[in-house]
Image: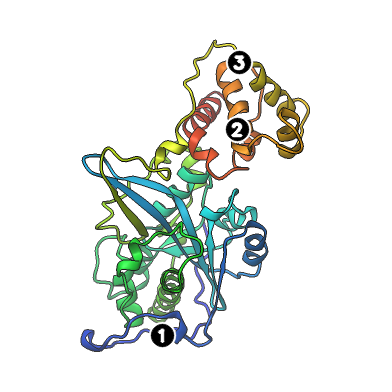
Amino acid sequence: MKEPVVPPESDAMVVDAPAAVRMLYSYKEFTPTPTLVYTRHEEEANDLVQALRGPLGFDLEWRVVIRRGMPFIDRRTAVVQLSDEKMILVIQISAMQKFPQKLKEIIESPDIVKMGANIANDGRKLFNDFGILAANLVELGGLGRVADPQFPFTRSIVALATMVERYTGKTLDKGKVRSSNWEEIPLTEEQLHYAANDAHCALMVYNSLLKTSAASGRILTADKFTSNLKDNYENGKLKLKTSAPSPISRESTASSIETQSSGSSSGSSRGSGWDNPTVQPGDQPKPQHMRAYNMWHHRNMTMDQIRAALRSKENPLAVSTVISYVVWALQADTSLPFSVRRLKEFVQLEAGSWRRHRDWIVRVDAERRSVS
């Protein structure tokens, strides 16, 4: 059993203000005022996340493409926000070739609390997009049900704006910026403020709930409001595709909504990640695919070495192409040996490749687990 949750030292207090006079929530109004840091560079993100100290407010942003007469399409996660009481980090993943390794480690760490509203859905989104198995995700509504004797909701998933209003006395702005283009470089000041507020307010609500629990003498058992995607994945209970609500009603994550006619095309649509050819077991792998596989599996060459060897140092093959070559070789010849763990790490070297090859990798992994 997990240890009881201990309330942190925090200046965040519940403000019981009438609805008519409630002010908009802003992280800038808190003391100490956290520093907002925005990065769109992988190495910088890896350095910055190591300065964070949990527990951490957590949220994601992404675009949604709507085509008339067709189901809407979720783009990959564009922005990840994390907040402790001193720093709010807004990381624009869509501007990077690879998901930052240190950020991945924090999200997957079972020792670092990450909290938010409908946070398990965000965890599934990260798995679907990048193969990340988030751990220690605290659902604020679920925590509220066990921490607050006066909690008025029977459900465990409660809109972030509702939780913020109850536990900070302020109104969380969910205006038009919510549906802006989160892949635009750079993000605007309005977008940054919105993203920062979403992560910071989750932490403030969390701190307030822990104080409420302590004041009422309640002992919190983390298992009642915490999810761990790694456990779900290993038990075969992790859904492959995020069951996202309508973009109009989504409460936990802000997504850009792009409307298109059914006849239009979008370079940012799901199609760019799902264009690999159909490979049937028993097909002979193409020579170039086998070369890539042998360099990766038998010769243990780095990605940059393989890219250069398959083309030239001056004009190396694209990372995504190398990854696809290796996967297609394995799909064509199912007798080829390989480590699923190593393949996952290899595929995750390029942000779009996991989503492209995810279903096959997960299926193979599940088959191996079932016979082990």
Q: Residues within 10 Å of mark 2 (few under 14, many from 20)?
A: some
Q: Specify the amino acid type for callout 3.
A: Pro
Q: Position of residue 314 (x, y in %)?
A: 75, 38
What numbered label is drawn on residue 292? none
- The residue drawn where x is 30% and y is 70% is 175
Distance of label 2 from label 3 (alpha carbons): 15 Å
Q: Is residue 65 left or right of residue 98?
A: left
Say whether disc 1 or disc 2 marks the residue closer to the N-terminus: 1
Residue at screen point 27% across, 88% down: 17
Q: Amino acid at mark 2?
A: Thr
Residue 185 placement, left or right of 156: right
Tell me where residue 173 sits by quadrant.
bottom left
Q: Is residue 240 visible?
A: no
Residue under label 1, please give it: 13
Q: Left or right? Give the position of 247 relative to 332.
A: left
Query: Of residues 174 and 171, which is closer to you in this image?
Result: 174
Q: Nearer the viewer, residue 264 or 342?
A: 264
Q: Which residue is mark 3?
A: 285
Looking at marks 3 and 1 on the same chain, the residue that comes earlier in the sequence is marked by 1
Q: In the rendered image, which residue does mark 2 sit on?
A: 321
